[in-house]
Amino acid sequence: HAQHLTDSIRVNQVGFYPAAPKIAVVVGAAAGPFYITTPDRATVVFTGQLSEAREAKLAQQQARIADFTTLTQQGTFVVWIPTVGFSYPFRIQPNVHEGVAQAALKGYYYQRASTALPPAYATRWSRALGHPDTRVLVHSSAASATRPAGTVLSSPRGWYDAGDYNKYIVNSGITVATLLSLYEAFPAYCAQLKTGIPESPNALPDVLDEVLWNLRWMLTMQDPNDGGVYHKLTNASFDGMVLPDQATAPRYVVQKSAAATLDFAAVLAQASRVLRRFDRPLPGLADSCLRASRQAWDWARAHPAVLYRQDEMNKQFQPAIVTGAYGDDAVQDEFIWAAAELYITTKEDRYYSAVPLFPDAHVPLPTWNQVRTLAYYSLVRHKASLTPAARQDMPKLEARLRAAADALQQNYKAQAYQTVMGKAAADYSWGGNATAANQGIALIQAYHLTSDPTYLQAALSNLDYLLGRNATGYCFLTGSGTKSPQHPHHRPSEGDGVVEPVPGLLVGGPNPGRQDKCAYPSALPALAYSDSVCSYASNEIAINWNAPLVYLAAALEALQNK
Ligand code: 9MR
């Protein structure tokens, strides 16, 4: 009997709700019994038989399922397969993912620019203030009559985008919106979700305090002279792997873009209606957000063809900017999103009818350059308060959202790992872990429309994926589970001298594109993941990946008894 830890048993390394489906996957094992035991294997609490083997094609693995759904006893357990060994431990208990939701939200605190992180909040990942961003230069690409090149602006705060130290409006947009949408959908749950940040004692939920850190920065990125929004605040090139206070290269705001300006308009409109509820602690802020949003919208309407094309820009302007581009050549979806959010906040029909909101029947999964469905989620979330013009479209929209969720969950139990994630090879790409989380959110939308709990189980399958039930065997959230990333492409984690990486950060995950050209254990789509600092294409972290995980974990916590 094998009495050793094995990582060929893949299981959510955090745990399971007592009444939820419970599945582990074992790779390369023969048929036979499995046992759920206490971590010392002294007490067997469940006995079952492994399923027949199925091929996980995108990993070329033979996988068997250990299904222990009917085990509801609370505690900490392992899966033990006598011919293979025992798994990492997991818990069965209510609120089992609360720590994941807290940690992933706290991840934003660790990403804050322009502030020191004292030990009281950041424990051993405390660090000095970096990037005050109070003397940011207007890049030549952004020069205007009122702000010539070299003009000094103050643009502090915001979150670092990812493993790098730059601040990008496009990616901030979807990130802040995802967190605001979590709050709008689950305000009571968010009110009690505490992360231990300096603002925790104040009147706002921590998720909104965290959002404000980035929102106040976003507001500084709008040119008050015309309403346009600079595409990003960035170094000319990426920093070395050092802590923020040692990264002192000049910082620039670069040219305005329609995508950034529309994302800004959408987020500030949404923020306005959310912050309206907190007018007393934050007097005037909701009004300021709405004014900024309207101005941004007007600028974008006048400049719909101003795209961010970094390579073109570098042919004309100095210094050359070679950091993350977040270039997007198609802004129809950004127009839809901004129009919808402005409409929902103001109830002015002119925004609803400004652009065709339903150019086709698609409900594309949200990502930084495809934001159309964020508009749809918001419209449906607010359907009770819409004007007749919009209300008449809601049955059609709801049917499309349901159909999209049905397509996601169709057949997922026939997959070797029984997760929604990974049914399609295209799920594995740069930041594919955010695809898994966003699929979960799409399924939760369908639950809201139908009250059908099978959508929640499908969403939970993707949380299981992210926390360990995947072909790599990694729990992809730093600091959670047992086998989690140790070497994320993340400058603070690399530069701080602390062995463990900064916790609460979701890495990108398997990406057969392997654009970083690092050493990977496998090129197969589901296995192309490299836990190395080198691997920015599979092992970086990013704010737009953490946000859907915060949403998924928090929403499933809030709905755990459904
Ligand atoms: O998440 C982005 C991914 O969709 C793109 O394919 C990739 C290449 O353009 O860039 C990713 O975003 C990175 C950004 O450009 C710079 N900061 C780190 C981001 C995550 O790797």
Image (spheres, rainbow, N blue to C red):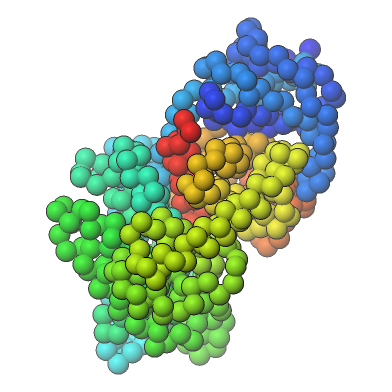
Q: Position of residue 401 (x, y in %)?
A: 55, 57
Q: Position of residue 519 (x, y in %)?
A: 72, 52
Q: Is residue 203 visible?
A: yes
Q: Residue at x 70, y 14 (%)?
A: 47
Q: Residue at x 79, y 12 (%)?
A: 1
Q: Position of residue 541 (x, y in %)?
A: 52, 52
Looking at the picture, does residue 469 appear above or below residue 321? above
Asked where in the image residue 387 lies, by quadrant, the reply is: bottom left
Q: Residue at x 57, y 42 (%)?
A: 455
* Residue ranking furthest to the top: 42
Depth order, front residue of 14/353: 353
* Residue ranking furthest to the right: 30
- Judge from the rendering whether residue 56 lies leftward or rightward of residue 256; answer left or right: right
- Judge from the rendering whether residue 472 lies leftward or rightward of residue 15; answer left or right: right
Q: Position of residue 122 (x, y in %)?
A: 35, 41
* Residue ranking furthest to the bottom: 145
Looking at the picture, does residue 413 appear above or below residue 379? above
Q: Is residue 242 visible?
A: no
Q: Residue at x 34, y 82 (%)?
A: 298
- Judge from the rendering whether residue 232 lies leftward or rightward of residue 520; answer left or right: left
The tally of labels here is: 0
Depth order, front residue of 520/291: 291
